[in-house]
Amino acid sequence: MTRVNGSRLTIAISVVAMAILFLQPPLARADEGSSPATVNVSPTVESAADTFAFISWTTRNPGGTILHYAMVHYGKDPNHLDFTATSPVRINPARRDMIFRVRMNDLQPETTYYYWVSSTQADGNPDPVTSAVQQFNTQPANRTSAGK
């Protein structure tokens, strides 16, 4: 009888240990920084011309689908970012980081634009990365071709 009780105790301990191991949220590695749910990125304005601009940002590889869509939400009023520019990006599962880059077209010269960035997987699931609202200015209208 002791053997049966000992076996039951061993099984019960194993079940509890597995529950603790598999039901806990994953621990962040020391090199990963904050948890993915709270990741905030700082996008960079690579260039801003008179009618277009390039915005880029780097994040940890978000995993999920191979195809992602980088998105810049923008507008002339920081409280009404009604326009969206998107760009498809393929992730490399072997890489730790991922670079997103979006071209914004049809902008107006000498204008201040406000924007924030995000990304989604091809299946529509959002990545856990966004940015705060930032701003940039487009350049004056290109007059080089008119002067020649």
Image (cartoon, rainbow, N blue to C red):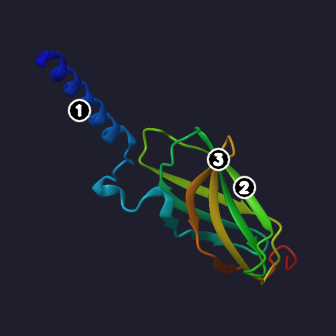
User: Which label's residue is closer to the chain start, 3 or 2?
Assistant: 2
Is residue 96 shown left or right of residue 99?
A: left
- Residue on which the image places disc 1: 13
Percent x, y for residue 146? 88, 77
Label at residue 125: 3
Residue 145 at what x, y percent from top left?
A: 84, 73
Observer-nearest of 45 and 32 = 32
User: Could you tell me the amino acid type at mark 3?
Assistant: Asn
Disc count in the image? 3
What is the number of the mark on residue 38? Answer: none
Residue found at the very far left of the displayed protein:
2
> Residue 112, position in %: x, y?
74, 83
Q: Amino acid at mark 2?
A: Thr
Q: Nearer the viewer, residue 46 or 13?
A: 13
| Circle 2 residue | 86
Quadrant where the N terminus is found in the figure: top left
Please give the name of the residue rendered at 52% of the width and 70% of the height, measured from the top-left corner: 42
User: Would you say 94 lies left or right of 9 here?
Assistant: right
| Residue at x 69%, y 52% (from the top left corner) | 87
State the CA–CA distance, disc 1 to disc 2.
51 Å
**Quadrant in which residue 33 is drawn:** bottom left
Say which residue appears at 59% left-offset and 74% top-offset. 132
